[in-house]
Image (cartoon, grey):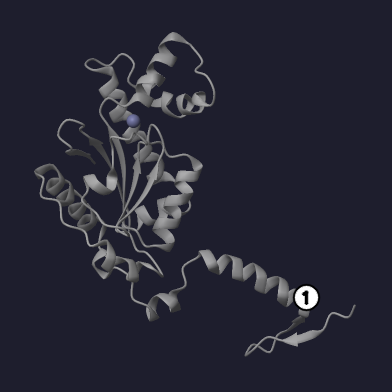
Amino acid sequence: MCECVVSTAGTGAIVGRRTVLKLAATAGAALAFLPQPHAQVAKPPPKPENVLSPDAALDRLMKGNTRYVDGVAKRHDFNHEREPLRTGQNPYAGVLSCADSRIAPEYCFDTARGDIFVCRVAGNFASDEMVASFEYAVQVLNTPLIMVLGHDACGAVDATMKSVKDGTTLPGHLPALVDAISPAVKAVEGEGGDMLANAIRRNVMLNVEKLKAAGPILSAFVESKKLRVVGGIYKLASGRVELLV
Ligand SMILES: [Zn+2]
């Protein structure tokens, strides 16, 4: 079969038709994911109030937590926010939270739909899939802040401590959680005080550092000060998030 020859518009370049189709398919797949500057210029973000600096995003997140703690959370009108979010999203913060049912990031920061990009796993650790998800949030959705959100009395960290201490292997797929959380547990061995609280805090901070250093995308955004990554500990009794920076 003949490979028809075509001229690419405006460039004068002559390439084979099959090559053009192949290039178009590859570019199309990439462009569907990567940011498209012209489209962004033409179309305002669905939530203009979410276009914030990293520091302003953190301030807004923590003010939302204060409202939640004080019992004065805003009334969210889910009807009116559906239409602007139908065609896009620009969350002002990402949250890597434990899957524990007592932690509800959207509630505890008093946020609406389209405000925070939440990834959850028991023990709030940054697996490759989590890093990739936040790369999407930061690079494509322009999210300026990520918080790794642990909480007190975390069962995943507690189970990891017991498994490491006793040398036992947990059933099913649970060893995957132990593998991910055990660096934090081992790092606080020998420290005084409450070992579970220490391990929870260390686990948050190790994952903050991991996200900050995750190249090539997140590390570059951190370096250029377009992204902040912070830690937080959710207190079950009060609902307050203690900030770790
Ligand atoms: Zn937990």
Q: Which residue is drawn at 35% across and 20% down?
A: 158
Q: In which quarter of the image is residue 11?
A: bottom right
Q: Residue furthest right?
A: 1
In depth, the one of 16 and 119 nearer the eye is 119
Note whether 149 is above or below 32 in the view shown: above
Note whether 18 is above or below 131 in the view shown: below
Amino acid type, mark 1: Arg
Q: In which quarter of the image is residue 111?
A: bottom left
In depth, the one of 239 and 205 nearer the eye is 239
Note whether 111 is above or below 233 in the view shown: below
In depth, the one of 103 and 204 nearer the eye is 103
Residue 28: x %, y % from top left = 60, 70
Horizontal side of residue 134 vs 233, given as left or right:
right
Q: Residue furthest front?
A: 79
Residue 162: x %, y % from top left = 39, 14
Work out which quarter of the rendered image holds the N terminus and state it.
Answer: bottom right
Q: Which residue is drawn at 26% across and 23% down?
A: 197
Q: Residue at x 39, y 45 (%)?
A: 119
Horizontal side of residue 164 vs 55, given as left or right:
right
Say which element carries label 1.
helix
Horizontal side of residue 59 vs 84, given as left or right:
left
